[in-house]
């Protein structure tokens, strides 16, 4: 199932309209999360319709539904692929009836492991070597009797099936493992980025705190080369950091509302970001300048750049927030999952112009 493509506006009158939007059918309610597997040929999505779905995506961005993973008893708030095994997918469900993290084998279409959690969890990250899955609780550390805990991260050893729970005195938003799996990096409500040493057995040791922004840091991503980290904030800025010394290099893009989600291109040269301002920005990592803006006519919950190198098209999947859209109300025919297709050569040409 798929929708047709449509041309979308660019960042300015001097820039040609280079991108197109491709609708992907299958969900009946808002999509919360999108993720590509390590080989970049499968796209997973999790939705308020209580399903996770997996699509095969060709080089042009056309998607064919492969799997519909159910049952979940609540909204599927996150999906995350095993970085080592391109056929193993984690889903996180949230709601009164379902506080479960499930591991799926997409070849057999079956859930191979379920972890019952004591609170609702809304964020997820898999360690690059595939051994640990971290899940973060919803704001406030629901069901906690500990007044000192505002949030939790539980680290699941997916080989031994042991869970280590960590509490934090501040609200934690997104988090990620470092490329070598030795550290965990957290964004917080305080505008800080917190760095923890990740120790075998799921233990964390605080290493460093960085005041990255003046307001809540919502999102982060580390580029595939491991050189840079991008942080998106409520203050409408995206900051770019050198990962070795954690030095801020520059601001990236041009948003006017809080930044909700960021994603690096597989080559590390570009950064896609989205906020409440109804568009996807693509910026140059080298200069920080916006190269292109694709109008989406809606807010975006999450974006994910396809991790494939060498193609003629660069593909960025995004989850639409229909509640924050230009239309009055959502309909059953709405395509809550879309793919932005941009010619790779056009991006390279715009980047060259911005650096000259």
Image (cartoon, rainbow, N blue to C red):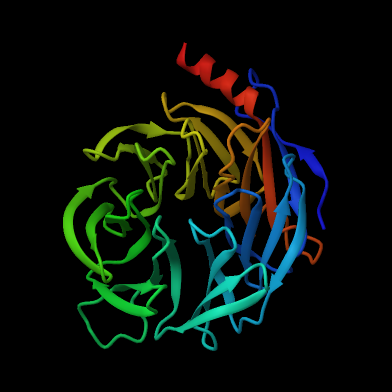
Q: Is residue 198 above or below residue 58?
A: below
Q: Is residue 151 above or below residue 265?
A: below
Pick the front one: 216 or 306:
306
Quick check: 84 left or right of 7?
Answer: left
Pick the front one: 70 or 105:
105
Quick check: 301 left or right of 51?
Answer: left
Image coordinates of residue 149 in percent, x first then y, are: 24, 76
When asked about the image quadrant of residue 61, the answer is top right
Quick check: 78 left or right of 328?
Answer: left
Image coordinates of residue 284 in percent, x first then y, are: 48, 28
Pick the front one: 317 or 233:
317
Q: Residue at x 56, y 44 (%)?
A: 307
Q: Residue at x 67, y 42 (%)?
A: 340
Q: Residue at x 30, y 85 (%)?
A: 144
> Quarter of the image containing the N terminus?
bottom right
Q: Is residue 178 visible in the rendered structure shown here?
A: yes
Image coordinates of residue 115 in percent, x first then y, are: 46, 82
Pick the front one: 179 or 235:
179
Q: Is residue 216 above or below residue 49?
A: above
State how many labels appear. 0
Q: Is residue 321 visible in the rendered structure shown here?
A: no
Quick check: 38 left or right of 223?
Answer: right
Q: Residue furthest top?
A: 356
Image coordinates of residue 217 in percent, x first then y, are: 35, 53
């Amino acid at each position: 199932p798929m929708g047709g493509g449509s041309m979308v506006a660019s960042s300015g009158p001097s820039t040609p309209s280079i991108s197109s939007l491709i609708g992907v059918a299958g969900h009946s309610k808002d999509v919360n999360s999108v993720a590509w597997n390590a080989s970049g040929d499968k796209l997973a999505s999790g939705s308020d319709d209580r399903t996770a779905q997996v699509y095969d995506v060709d080089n042009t961005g056309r998607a064919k539904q492969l799997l519909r993973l159910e049952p979940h008893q609540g909204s599927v708030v996150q999906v995350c692929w095993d970085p080592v095994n391109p056929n193993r997918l984690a889903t996180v469900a949230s709601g009164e009836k379902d506080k479960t993290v499930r591991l799926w084998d997409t070849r057999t279409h079956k859930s191979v492991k379920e972890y019952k959690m004591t609170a609702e969890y809304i964020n997820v990250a898999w360690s690059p070597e595939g051994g640990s899955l971290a899940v973060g609780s919803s704001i406030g550390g629901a069901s906690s009797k500990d007044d000192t805990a505002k949030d939790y991260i539980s680290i699941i050893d997916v080989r031994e099936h042991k869970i280590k729970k960590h509490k934090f005195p501040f609200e934690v938003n997104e988090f990620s493992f470092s490329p070598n799996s030795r550290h965990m990096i957290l964004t917080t409500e305080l505008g800080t980025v917190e760095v923890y040493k990740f120790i075998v057995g799921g233990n964390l040791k605080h290493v460093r705190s960085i005041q990255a922004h003046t307001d809540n840091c919502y999102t982060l991503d580390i580029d595939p080369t491991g050189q840079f980290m991008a942080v998106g904030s409520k203050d409408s800025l995206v900051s770019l950091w050198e990962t070795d010394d954690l030095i801020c290099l520059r601001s990236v893009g041009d948003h006017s509302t809080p930044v909700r989600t960021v994603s690096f291109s597989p080559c590390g040269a570009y950064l896609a970001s989205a906020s409440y301002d109804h568009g996807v920005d693509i910026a140059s990592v080298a200069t920080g300048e916006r190269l292109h803006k694709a109008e989406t006519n809606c807010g975006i919950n999450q974006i994910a750049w396809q991790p494939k190198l060498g193609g003629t098209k660069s593909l960025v999947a995004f989850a639409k927030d229909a509640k924050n859209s230009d239309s009055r109300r959502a309909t059953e025919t709405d395509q809550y999952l879309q793919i932005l297709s941009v010619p790779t050569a056009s991006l390279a040409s715009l980047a060259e112009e911005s650096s000259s």
